[in-house]
């Protein structure tokens, strides 16, 4: 049975801290648009308060989350227990993109480890916290983080990342404009 909370309680904060993987979902307003669901890993999520989270967004093949947030702000995070007691945790809220040229960057960026390929930070104000049973989620054993994205970004270098962002990250697959930094 689902339980709803106003904030990310301390036990839920600990649950989040124990997860190696989370998912982020956003969607455009258009019914014809595509819902985006992305897995996230590495040491990229920070709980800023019981109702505020941020994650370091690394360069990817698209920039759907940022484009959707610019259009409507809606975002959902999902965490699943792959080990231990079953549980699914969803955080619903309104988010925005923080670029390295935004004043907020100076406060947020030092909270994360320096990671090659960092594109932006996604921040969300959480207005609904919901757990559900998660008994259908299988057990999986965490082995380690992958390093391919960091290796790829390091090989690209600053100029290569900027060119990639200009080529691949300016619009969503539905044509929405995505905020993007003009420097690495």
Image (cartoon, rainbow, N blue to C red):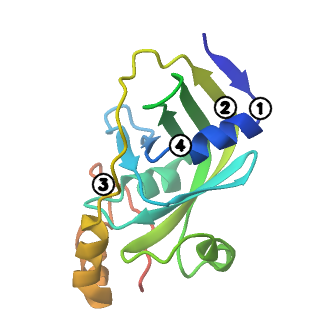
Q: Earlier in the sequence, mark 1 or mark 3?
A: 1
Nearest to the observer: residue 174 or residue 169: 169
The residue positioned 57% from the left and 30% from the top of the image is 89
**Regarding mark 3 in the picture, which secondary structure is present there?**
loop
CB atoms at circles 4 and 3 under 8 Å apart? no
Q: Earlier in the sequence, mark 2 or mark 4?
A: 4
The residue positioned 51% from the left and 56% from the top of the image is 70
Task: Give the residue at mark 3.
Answer: 175
Residue 68 placement, left or right of 54: left
Crowd around label 4: few <14 · some 14–19 · many ≥20 (10 Å): many
Task: Give the residue at mark 4.
Answer: 75
The residue positioned 42% from the left and 31% from the top of the image is 82
Q: Estimate the x, y position of residue 34 in percent, counting from the top left.
A: 31, 39
The vertical placement of 109 against 91, above or below, is below
Spatial separation of the CA atoms under disc 1 and disc 3: 35 Å
The residue positioned 71% from the left and 35% from the top of the image is 11
Task: Give the residue at mark 1.
Answer: 6
Task: Give the residue at mark 2.
Answer: 129
Crowd around label 1: few <14 · some 14–19 · many ≥20 (10 Å): few
Q: Earlier in the sequence, mark 4 or mark 3?
A: 4
Spatial separation of the CA atoms under disc 1 and disc 2: 6 Å
Query: Which image quarter holds the C terminus?
Result: bottom left
């Amino acid at each position: 049975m689902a339980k709803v909370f106003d904030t990310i309680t301390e036990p839920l904060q600990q649950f989040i801290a124990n997860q190696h993987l989370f998912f982020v979902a956003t969607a455009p307003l258009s019914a014809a648009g595509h819902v985006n669901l992305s897995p996230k890993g590495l040491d990229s999520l920070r709980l800023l308060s019981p109702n505020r989270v941020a994650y370091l967004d690394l360069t990817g093949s698209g920039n759907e989350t940022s484009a959707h947030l610019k259009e409507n702000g809606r975002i959902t995070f999902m965490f699943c227990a792959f080990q231990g007691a079953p549980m699914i945790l969803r955080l619903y809220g309104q988010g925005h993109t923080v670029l390295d040229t935004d004043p907020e960057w100076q406060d947020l960026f030092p909270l994360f480890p320096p990671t090659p390929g960092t594109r932006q930070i996604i921040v969300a104000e959480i207005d609904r916290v919901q757990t559900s049973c998660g008994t259908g989620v299988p057990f999986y054993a965490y082995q380690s983080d992958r390093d391919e994205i960091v290796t790829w970004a390091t090989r690209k270098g600053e100029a290569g990342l900027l060119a990639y962002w200009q080529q691949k990250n300016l619009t969503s697959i539905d044509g929405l404009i995505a905020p993007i930094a003009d420097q690495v």
